[in-house]
């Protein structure tokens, strides 16, 4: 089973990540989604699981999408072949190291904990549960380019593949007008 792990889209999913999600059985979004259209753009083969992040608030979602926001839990867990995957956003207090220690104590019976919030791709596979941060899958603070993780799980040991794409150049949603020249000359650009 292949599980796409992503987070921190903030209203936009990089199309290369959306494409990779279609190759997975399950997609897991660890919060700061930014709108229902993001969830609709994720098309895994079987199931989409998503939680709320600290930026997933009624004020930041359009009025017509708030009913979707109301259905999203703050955290969840999935029983996958070979273990349990816990999903939370990771916006609780403390440094990344402090949060990691806390997650390992709190979710000691899980195989892995996936969380976002930092926008930094990282995997800590040195102890159990694994700590997996897919980074930012949109265009906001991607720290080197949009990223995600693909978790492969089954009867054998789990595997994690980090995927990072070059920073994208995305079309602007607003049309920008060029300022008028004040020199009055007719030079071509």
Image (tube, rainbow, N blue to C red):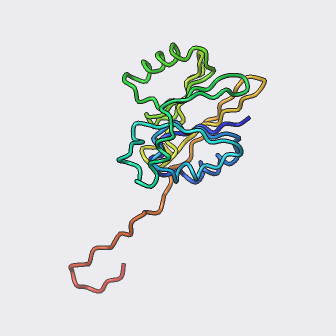
Query: Quadrant of the image for the N terminus?
Result: top right
- Image quadrant where residue 2 sits: top right
Q: Residue at x 44, y 20 (%)?
A: 97
Q: Which residue is drawn at 44% across and 48% down?
A: 66
Q: Residue furthest right?
A: 155
* Residue 28 percent location from the top left of the image: 59, 38
* Residue 161 percent location from the top left of the image: 65, 34
Give the number of marks.
0
* Residue 8 percent location from the top left of the image: 47, 41
Q: Give above or below for 16 relative to 46.
A: below
Closer to us: 143 or 151 = 151
Closer to us: 84 or 177 = 84
* Residue 19 percent location from the top left of the image: 64, 51
Q: Which residue is drawn at 21% across and 80% down?
A: 183
Is 26 positioned to the left or the right of 170 in the image? right
Query: Quadrant of the image for the C terminus?
Result: bottom left
Q: Residue furthest bottom?
A: 186
- Image quadrant where residue 157 sits: top right
């Amino acid at each position: 089973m292949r599980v796409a792990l992503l987070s921190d889209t903030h209203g936009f999913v990089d199309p290369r990540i959306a494409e990779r999600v279609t190759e997975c059985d399950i997609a897991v979004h660890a919060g700061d989604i930014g709108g229902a259209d993001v969830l609709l753009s994720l098309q895994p083969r079987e199931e989409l699981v998503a939680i709320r992040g600290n930026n997933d608030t009624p004020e930041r979602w359009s009025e017509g999408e708030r009913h979707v926001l109301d259905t999203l839990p703050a955290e969840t867990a999935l029983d996958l072949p070979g273990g349990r995957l816990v999903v939370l956003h990771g916006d609780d207090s403390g440094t990344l190291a402090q949060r990691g220690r806390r997650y390992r104590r709190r979710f000691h019976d899980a195989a892995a904990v996936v969380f976002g919030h930092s926008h930094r791709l990282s995997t800590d596979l040195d102890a159990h549960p694994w700590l997996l941060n897919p980074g930012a899958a949109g265009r906001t603070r991607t720290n080197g380019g949009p990223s995600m993780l693909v978790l492969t799980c089954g009867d054998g040991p789990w595997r994690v593949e980090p995927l990072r794409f070059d920073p994208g150049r995305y079309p602007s949603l607003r049309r920008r007008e060029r300022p008028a020249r004040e020199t009055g000359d007719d030079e071509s650009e």
